[in-house]
Image (cartoon, grey):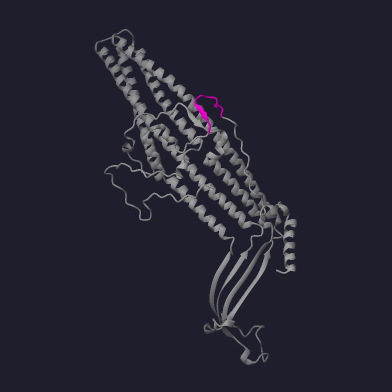
Amino acid sequence: MSARRRMGTTALLLAALLLGGCTTGLREYVHNGFKVGPNYQRPAAPVADEWIDSESGRLQIGPVDDKAWWQLFQDPVLDRLVLTAYQQNITLREAGFRIAEAQSQRAVTVGNLFPQTQELFGDYTRTQRSTQTATFPQGAALPPGLIVTNFSTYRLGGALAWELDFWGRYRRAIESADARLDSEVENYDDVLVLLIAEVASTYVDIRTLEQRLDYARSNVALQGESARIAGARLDAAAVDSEVDAPQARSNLARTQAAIQLLEVEQRQAQNRLAVLMGMPPHDLGYLLAGERGIPQAPQTVAIDLPASLLRRRPDVRRAERLVAQQSALIGVAETNLYPAISINGSLALEAATFERLFNSDAWSGTVGPAFRWNVLNYGRLVNLVNVEEARLQQQIAQYQQTVLEANEEAENAIVGFRLYHDQIGYLNESVAQAQEAVRVTQLKYQEGQIDFNRVFTLEQLLVTQQDQLAISAGNSAQSLIQLYRAMGGGWEMRLYPPPPVALPPVGPAVEPEADPEVDPEVVVPPQPARP
């Protein structure tokens, strides 16, 4: 390049940077690696210094390893359900294919660094000229042999157009695509965290309903005995049994009706669990067999400081990556304020006959630099930059709100974990006392020492307290699940994939016909390693 051409190019660059009316100055342009627009900086986020209940004896503050937190319940059925859901869940598979889409989209964006237009062409045209136009030679202006009224043209060649990335348009676009790819990886991890927590939560719901049903059925037997005693007293013509017998039967029927409602909830929970594992709803008895009782949460739990939420929770990391994606788009929009500098060229073979098309003198071509500058559109272009900057502020606010909500979820789970344990102790005492009171009142009623109202009241109390005990035990386990969900535990499973789970046979059910267009294997696309 000659000195004059270099000076002209430098002057064009300086004029564009100084007269473009943009926020990126010459020094910042050089500092950014010859790219306009801001370099990304992680936004500040409001995080508490410590947990509200940090001094509680049930919390152990410090670094933790929670990549397989559900194993704290020491329940092999739950372990198997979690692994099955990881291998077969449809929503998780969808999130995996979103990563594959983002990977391909990034590859498309990287391709813009190279000549954007690269094409081969070939054509044949037959031209017939009119002899009645003003541009056609008339009279003896040319010798008759040189007047051509029809001819053929054969052409074969290629063209190239390359807009140079002077202002960083395409490099900023790659930054944005990288951040979007990261956000999809974080979205996959977030779906995995939610999936594990929902499987565990649904499993606890099922076991809690089983315990409530056990209590309800034992109370049906107990109340059935009271109804039998009241009926016997009625047969013996006891004066107060005219009311006692129907009252006892009413109490019994109400408890029996409660069993029906609990069985409905149990079936619905099993259906939900089947869908989470990528199966049609069906009887899951073959998967749930072998264990009974509500999973018990440990008395203490180890958690990290609140600031760890920024690196542990995938949804927080995803929100931060969306901020980075939007930051790069500001630079993409700002490049529209500067001239687009490109190199264009074409090379072709042209001849009047096909036989002469490949002669050495049939070559033709053009090559040269060019620029385009939208100098009369600054009102719109500047406002497009402002649009991207406003969107950046929206993403920052959303990121900060996500951090706050993460902190809230963790605090809610901590207080639940701390207090549900205490509640279980009180309810155990209440149930034990209610059982003793029912036993004594039944004996006294049978001997005619008290009326049935005492029995009725205490039987109702026992039903309520046993049901509350089962619910509280379930809530205790649920609070631990929600705590690890709030802390973002479990996504590491994709880094250390477990071996496949062999499921027991469902039974002689008829399998649906396979769709030839659907791969029967559940495949999660390969995930890029975390940066």
Q: Could you tell me if residue 240 is visible in this image?
A: no
User: Quick check: 96 left or right of 149?
Assistant: left
User: Quick check: 32 left or right of 356?
Assistant: right
The N terminus lies in quadrant: bottom right
Given residues 499 and 90, the one toward you in this image is 499
User: Quick check: 335 left or right of 207?
Assistant: right
Residue 319 percent across, percent down from the top left: 56, 43
Q: Could you tell me if residue 229 is visible in this image?
A: yes
Q: Quadrant of residue 243?
A: top left
Residue 155 percent across, percent down from the top left: 55, 78
> Relative to 169, is 473 above or below?
above
Main secondary structure of the magenta stretch: loop
Residue at the image position 33 percent from the left and 9 percent from the top: 450
Q: Quadrant of residue 204?
A: top left
Residue at the image position 63 percent from the left and 63 percent from the top: 163
> Relative to 494, is 145 above or below?
below
Specify the farthest residue to the left: 236
Residue 256 percent across, percent down from the top left: 33, 25
Given residues 89 and 311, the one toward you in this image is 311
Residue 496 percent across, percent down from the top left: 44, 44
Figure disc tally:
0
Is 384 colored magenta in this rendering?
A: no
Report the span colored magenta: 51-62
Q: In which quarter of the image is residue 404?
A: top right
Specify the farthest residue to the top: 449
Given residues 156 and 414, the one toward you in this image is 414
